[in-house]
Amino acid sequence: MDPLMGVVGAILVSRWSLSLLNSTSAVLLDKQKPKSLEIKIRQCIEVNDCKIIDLHLWSIGPNIYSAIISVLARSAKKPEHYKELISPDPRLVHLTVEVNESSEEDFSE
């Protein structure tokens, strides 16, 4: 009976380790962000005189994300303004915003 339980235990541990590897590898290898969240962030920020010039989005847990956004604006506002535009999304738990003021030529590209 003991050898049989040893085999059963090995099978259970193997299944558990494979499921753990499957669930954590996405976070450890910087799995691609959901396109819907990236589109939502762009729609919230890119209005009137603003555009996102750099956006990094990371999965930091099951269905929770962190983002670093670099915004180019003709009339720059404080980073808190841009954070408030995005804040209703509960999936985004940590947000860093960098704001750069620009000239008209920057928007013609």
Image: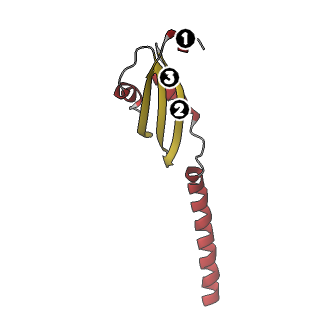
**Whole-number angstrom distance, CA of label 2 to CA of label 1:** 21 Å
**Whole-number angstrom distance, CA of label 2 to CA of label 3:** 13 Å
Query: At 58% across and 67% down in the image, what residue appears?
Result: 16
Eye-nearest disc, 2 or 1: 1
Q: Is residue 20 above or below residue 91?
A: below
Say the numbered circle drawn on residue 75: none
Eye-nearest disc, 3 or 1: 1
**Whole-number angstrom distance, CA of label 3 to CA of label 1:** 22 Å
State the residue in front, 42 or 75. Answer: 75
Say the numbered circle drawn on residue 43: 3
Name the spot of residue 49 as percent of width and height, x first: 46, 13
Quadrant showing the C terminus: top right
Give the secondary structure at mark 2: strand
Q: Is residue 94 left or right of residue 22?
A: left
Q: Is residue 20 above or below residue 14?
A: above
Neighbour class for label 1 at 10 Å: few (<14), some, many (≥20)?
few
Question: Which amino acid type is shown beneath numbered disc 3?
Answer: Gln
Name the spot of residue 34 as percent of width and height, x first: 56, 37
Q: Is residue 75 above or below residue 33?
A: above
**N-terminal-most mark, 2 or 3:** 3
Residue named by callout 1:
105
Query: At 61% across and 57% down in the image, what residue appears?
Result: 22
Query: At 37% across and 28% down in the image, what residue appears?
Result: 79
Residue named by callout 2:
55
